[in-house]
Image: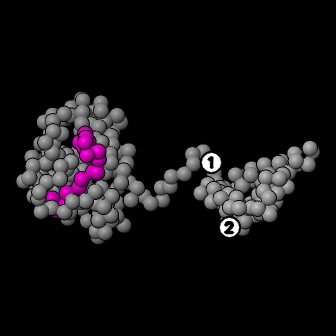
Amino acid sequence: MKTLDSIRFVLVGTTHPGNIGAAARAMKTMGISNLHLVEPLHFPSADATARASGADDLLASAVVHDNLQSAIEGCHQVYGMSARLRHLPVPVVDPRQAVEQIQQYQDGAQVAIVFGREHSGLSNEELDRCQNLINIPANEAYSSLNLAAAVQVFAYELKMSFNPEIKVGRIGEDREAIDAKDLEHLYSHFEESLMAIGFLDPQNPKNLMRRLRRLFNRADLDRNELQILHGILRAAEKSKGEF
């Protein structure tokens, strides 16, 4: 089984220690803990610890290397991050495509994601050690992400891919699903109610019910919402009868 432990983030030549701390924080929020540093200008550093905001355990376990070759030793695949698309014979993928590739590697395969210097990125010689180049599609007029932001983007893609059970839904609600039969009952109730209150002319219905179907098909109703709509329709029918 593939795990995030097989993926290491390698920061090359980081000049500001705060960026190391911010990158560690970005990694930890996504469950990634394998941090390697190549010739950081200042490390360890109080600035790095402060910016880590609780991810200082990643800083404590970070492995410091004298060169990139040492940092990627034992890795089966190496990806280099770059904001600039260079004229090099290196395949270029975006973060999501890179993660899809990583998922195809055999279990236990070690993968390195290499991030370059804040101002100049990775050198051509360093990119020569990467099998793929990752480029984050950004605003063409201002495409440069800071180091921690780039780390966060890729860490997020990894987290979502390696944890497919994560679902984005409505906060604070337990939603009971409904089925096609429930929806048909609702549409029938709508048609009956709208005719009862004089909103729908059965002799000239046009596309009203079709449009209502499209509306509620998009809404992804749950059981509570379905019952609310039925209640509104019953109240409308009752109110009509009282006039």
> What amino acid type should be assigned to the residue bearing mark 2?
Ala
Question: What residue is disc 2 on?
Answer: 180
User: Which residue corresponds to the image point at 27% horizontal and 37% vertical from the top-left?
Assistant: 21
- Whether residue 46 is situated above or below residue 113 in the rendered picture: above
- Labels in figure, total: 2
Q: Look at the image and tell me in which quarter the N terminus lies.
A: bottom left
Q: Which residues are magenta?
A: 130-146
User: At 19% across and 57% down in the image, what residue appears?
Assistant: 133
Q: Provide residue 90's location: percent of width, then percent of height.
A: 15, 61
Q: Nearer the viewer, residue 236 or 95?
A: 236
Picture colour scheme: one colour
Q: Earlier in the sequence, mark 1 or mark 2?
A: 1
- Residue 52 x/y as whole percent: 31, 36
Element under label 1?
A: loop
Answer whether residue 205 is magenta in the image. Answer: no
Which is nearer the eye, 60 or 243? 243
Q: In the image, residue 5 lies at what x, y percent?
A: 31, 56
Q: Which mark is residue 52?
A: none
Q: Residues within 10 Å of mark 2 (few under 14, many from 20)?
A: few
Q: Where residue 6 appears, x then y in whole percent? A: 28, 59
Q: Tell whether 89 sits left or right of 212.
A: left
| Residue identified by numbered label 1 | 173
How far is the residue under mark 1 from the one under mark 2?
A: 22 Å
Question: Which quadrant of the view contains residue 158?
Answer: bottom left
